[in-house]
Image (cartoon, rainbow, N blue to C red):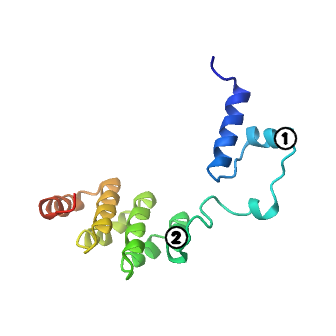
Amino acid sequence: MRPGIREAGLCAVLLALAAGCEPRGPVSEAAGRRSGYVPPVEEVRFRPSDRLLGRADLQEVVELQARGDVFGLLERLEADDSAVRARAAFALASVGAPEAVDGLVRALGDATAEVRRDAAFALGRLGDRYAVDPLVALLDREEDR
């Protein structure tokens, strides 16, 4: 038996809460009124990405991504920490800015495989023809597959 709209809406609210998201919209508001649940003020003012990461430098990359700050993310591609560089490359995939292509192509030469992987992913998402030759060259020399 398929659930009705009400049950499906409540399931969506429960899944969002389980995932740490603040459910929004008419279904979640109606469910909140029925259950009597009113989230505390500190729970409401944060986006799902807030406090997601235990490291401030990685959280900063998430915030730059949320703001669509391409140039801030490109600066993080030059960070000393490879985890920051990898997360910045991955974040640039979702921002989708063509001005990120040059920095991502440079990141294909990074010493850390995770940075190269995330830069390749981002370039694939951007779909810029300029990146094809560097990506093929990376495949030819890559040992960490």
Q: Is residue 66 above or below residue 29?
A: below
Residue at position x 64%, y 42% in the image: 15
Q: Position of residue 26 (x, y in %)?
A: 76, 40
* Direction from residue 117 to residue 6 in the image, left or right: right
Q: In this view, does 54 lie above or below 122?
A: below
Q: Position of residue 97 (x, y in %)?
A: 40, 63
Q: Where is residue 98 in the image (x, y as percent from the top left)?
A: 36, 63
Q: In this view, does 136 lie above or below 76?
A: above
- The residue singled out by tag 2 in the image is 64
Residue 102, labelled with which disc?
none
The disc, 1 or 2, on the residue closer to the chain's N-terminal end is 1
Quarter occupied by the C terminus: bottom left
Counting other residues with Cα less than 10 Å from the Cα at mark 2, is it few (<14), some (14-19), or many (20 or more)? Answer: many
Q: In this view, does 75 lie above or below 32?
A: below
Mark-to-mark CA distance, 1 and 2:
36 Å
* Direction from residue 140 to residue 47 in the image, left or right: right
* Direction from residue 73 to residue 10 in the image, left or right: right
* Outermost residue toward the bottom in this view: 80
Counting other residues with Cα less than 10 Å from the Cα at mark 1, is it few (<14), some (14-19), or many (20 or more)? Answer: few
Q: Is mark 1 on a helix, strand or loop?
A: helix
Q: Quadrant of residue 91?
A: bottom left
Residue at position x 68%, y 48% in the image: 17
Foreground disc of the pair 1, 2: 1
- The residue singled out by tag 1 in the image is 35
Q: What element carries label 2?
A: helix
Q: Quadrant of residue 36?
A: top right
Residue at position x 70%, y 26% in the image: 5
**Kind of residue indicated by mark 1:** Ser
Residue at position x 22%, y 72% in the image: 109
Q: Which of 95 and 8 is in front in this view?
A: 8
